[in-house]
């Protein structure tokens, strides 16, 4: 603060550079433009200096006699302000860099969270497919066993039918021989003087009708004999199909176990309940483990396994349906 004597006290407020400068300096926090603030500060110092020099007491104030002092003060203000501007600009640059870095970090975090959500959703979605695959496998596995049972029944029915047809053919042959024998006797009656009796028998058409019935029975037996042959042929084909389906199931089982291992689901038996439990434990366990399992899950392989099981199911159902039809026909 500029020093004054007692007689100058009434002019202290008017000519106090400290008060003016302090008052303006306090506005620094509110100023957006430091260059503008610096220029105004320099202007204020110069104006205060001029007013002080024009005062009647200026000769008594040593600080106002030397213009170089004022120039030094003004230059100091400029230098300090310029440094402050540079510093603030540097701070602004740093702030912008920090903001950009924060945005990048936040973006990366959000991206990672989205990736985590996507991977976990994929694990949950594909993982849900696993119990379905296990259920399909169990269902399809039961069909060849069912087909084997039907095939055994079919083969038994074929054997029984063939035996019955053989008996029917034997009976038809015996009946045919008997009819021929009876027809011969009827002819002999006329030779031995029993013409009237022979005519009556021929008129009753007993011989012709009996002959016709015997021929029909033989023809029916011969036609029926073809059915077991066709049934036996299809039964042999069905046997091959069942063995092929069983082999396909055996090849699918390792694939299914591989998909279970990819998700970290460990089960002792291929049941839907066990698979559901294993999947639930995985999803509710460690996020890192779940993420790594999701990353290693082969969804396309699972889709192929599902298609293979669907195809096997349809083929096994067709075999069972045909066997059921044959059993009903025998």
Image: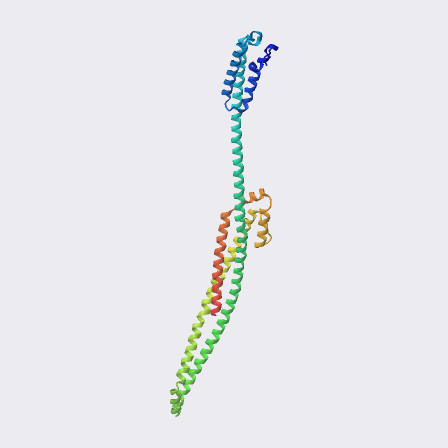
Position of 156 relative to 18 (above/below): below
- Please tell me which residue lies in front, 130 or 184: 130
Q: Quadrant of residue 204?
A: bottom left
Q: Which residue lies furthest to the right in this view?
A: 6
Position of 9 relative to 168 (above/below): above
- Please tell me which residue lies in front, 297 or 120: 120
Q: Residue furthest bottom?
A: 193
Question: Would you say residue 5 is visible in this rendering?
Answer: no
Looking at the picture, how far across and down is residue 238, in whole percent? 48, 62
Looking at the picture, how far across and down is residue 243, in whole percent? 51, 59
Q: Quadrant of the N terminus?
A: top right
Q: Residue at x 49, y 61 (%)?
A: 317
Question: Would you say residue 172 is visible in this rendering?
Answer: yes
Looking at the picture, how far across and down is residue 134, in whole percent? 54, 54
Looking at the picture, how far across and down is residue 259, in whole percent? 54, 49
Position of 100 relative to 295 (above/below): above
Scheme of image coloration: rainbow
């Amino acid at each position: 603060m500029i020093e004054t004597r007692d007689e100058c006290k009434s002019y202290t407020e008017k000519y106090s550079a400290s008060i003016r400068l302090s008052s303006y300096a306090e506005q620094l926090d509110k100023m957006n433009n430091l260059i503008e603030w610096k220029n105004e500060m320099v202007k204020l110092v110069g104006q205060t200096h001029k007013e002080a020099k024009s005062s009647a007491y200026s000769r008594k104030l040593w600080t106002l006699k030397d213009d170089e002092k004022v120039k030094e003060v003004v230059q100091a203000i400029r230098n300090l302000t310029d440094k402050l501007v540079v510093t603030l600009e540097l701070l602004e640059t740093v702030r912008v860099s920090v903001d950009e870095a924060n945005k990048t970090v936040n973006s990366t975090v959000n991206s990672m969270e989205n990736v985590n959500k996507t991977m976990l959703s994929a694990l949950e979605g594909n993982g849900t497919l696993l119990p379905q695959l296990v259920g399909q496998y169990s269902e399809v596995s039961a069909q060849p066993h069912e087909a084997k049972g039907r095939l055994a029944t079919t083969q038994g029915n074929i054997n029984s039918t063939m035996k019955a047809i053989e008996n029917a053919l034997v009976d038809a042959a015996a009946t045919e021989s008997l009819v021929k024998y009876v027809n011969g006797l009827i002819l002999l009656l006329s030779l031995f003087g029993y013409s009237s009796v022979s005519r009556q028998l021929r008129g009753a058409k007993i011989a012709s009708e009996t002959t016709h019935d015997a021929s029909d029975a033989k023809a029916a037996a011969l036609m029926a004999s073809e059915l077991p042959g066709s049934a036996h042929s299809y039964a042999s084909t069905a046997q091959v199909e069942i063995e092929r389906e069983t082999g396909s199931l055996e090849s699918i089982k390792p694939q299914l176990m591989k998909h279970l291992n990819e998700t970290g689901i460990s089960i002792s038996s291929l049941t839907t309940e066990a698979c559901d439990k294993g999947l639930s434990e995985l999803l509710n366990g460690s996020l890192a483990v779940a993420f790594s399992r999701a990353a290693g899950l082969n969804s396309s392989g699972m889709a192929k396994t599902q298609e293979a099981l669907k195809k096997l199911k349809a083929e096994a159902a067709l075999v069972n349906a045909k066997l059921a039809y044959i059993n009903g026909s025998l």
